[in-house]
Image (tube, helix red, strand yellow):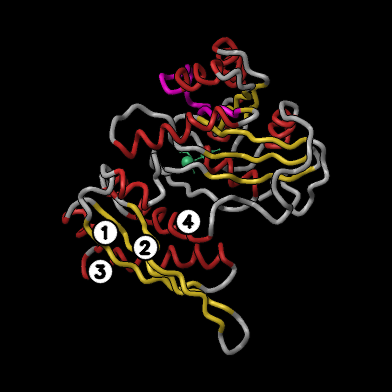
Amino acid sequence: MSTPQEPGTVAGTVAGTVAILGRPNVGKSTLLNALVGEKLAIVTPKPQTTRNRIVGVWNGPAGQIVFVDTPGVHGSSKALNRFMVQEALGTIESVDAALLVVDAGDRRPGNEERQILRELQAAKCPTVLAVNKVDKVKDKSALLPLLADWEQTAKFAALVPISALKAKNLEPLVRELAKLLPEGPPLYGPEMLTDRTERFLAAELIREQLFLLTRQELPYAVAVDIESWEERAKQDGTNDVVIEATILVERDSQKAIAVGKGGAMIKEVGTKARAGITELLGRPAHLKLQVKVDPEWTTSPAALARLGYRP
Ligand code: GDP
Ligand code: MG
């Protein structure tokens, strides 16, 4: 995939942070990955996949842009959901600019976009609108009235049609964002792509497979806790890593789904997640997964904090 990222170059003049905001499923995490050229944020066809802020660092001729992917903004009162919306909207205070991502299939701003735009306005945060998924729009002439409609709804610094999935039109998007950022030395060293640990990213890759492979309510009832992480130096001078992880669910019935018939589900989750983790780490990973029922994990503040969903 071609991306505007130029690895290892931190030579430009601007340096700043940009929050990627939008309702669930518009392609925020896909965009972060496309910009950075690495899979940092997990992506599934299901809403509310992303639960935490994830930083991805873009380095290029213009300088350095630190993108912050956020959970989708949606209305819901459950403790975990409140945390997710707070993770997203709370980001606004601490960034230099925002990128509001919308779906090219959406004609008008919904309640979520309105709420985000209100918060951005209150914080006087300069905002670029990215109209994503234009690859799905057959008749490209339909994009002009759509962009005109969006232009009416708020004062955007720029409106850019893109396809995060196909990495289309990302250069102009980055250029428009760079205009909004202060000049200064890079915030992260050239080797830093994210603020997240390998442990966090590995847990996310396991959670991604649970989202992709199971149906109904299960994805929203799971959390992944890395119990142990053992780096092993092998005889031939290479390293591998043994990871023990617990998949938490809320009910026995969900445990049955996560384990699957004769353990088939947990096995498939393990095989696929292991492949992703091995690619991420650049060294072989071995996964030991178990499933545990914890009825309180989405509601208990202590459990949420331990899992990294701190209020
Ligand atoms: P998020 O919830 O906003 O982070 O959205 P994701 O990045 O998880 O993407 C949600 C779904 O939209 C996934 O199935 C993606 O593959 C899909 N998607 C994201 N960007 C594009 C795009 O540019 N074009 C198309 N056709 N699909 C996309
Ligand atoms: Mg996401």
Does the Cβ of the disc 1 residue fall within 8 Å of ligand 1? no
Q: Which residue is mark 4?
A: 200
Which numbered disc, 3 or 4, marks the residue that appears first in the sequence? 4
Which numbered disc, 2 or 3, marks the residue that appears first in the sequence? 3
Above or below: residue 201 compared with residue 180: below
Amino acid type of disc 3? Gly
Does the Cβ of the disc 3 residue fall within 8 Å of ligand 1? no
Query: How far is mark 2 from mark 4, CA to CA?
Result: 17 Å
Mark 3 is surrounded, within 10 Å at the Cα level, by few (under 14), some (14 to 19) or many (20 or more) other residues, namely few
Q: Which residue is mark 1?
A: 258
Secondary structure at numbered mark 3: helix
Query: How far is mark 1 from mark 3, CA to CA?
Result: 8 Å
Which numbered disc, 4 or 1, marks the residue that appears first in the sequence? 4
Mark 4 is surrounded, within 10 Å at the Cα level, by few (under 14), some (14 to 19) or many (20 or more) other residues, namely some
Which numbered disc, 1 or 3, marks the residue that appears first in the sequence? 1
Q: Is 256 placed left or right of 54 in the picture?
A: left
Q: How far from the left and from the top, in percent, is residue 87?
A: 45, 36
Label 1–label 2 contact, CB within 8 A: yes
Q: Is 286 placed left or right of 135 in the picture?
A: left
Amino acid type of disc 2? Val
Secondary structure at numbered mark 1: helix
Mark 2 is surrounded, within 10 Å at the Cα level, by few (under 14), some (14 to 19) or many (20 or more) other residues, namely many
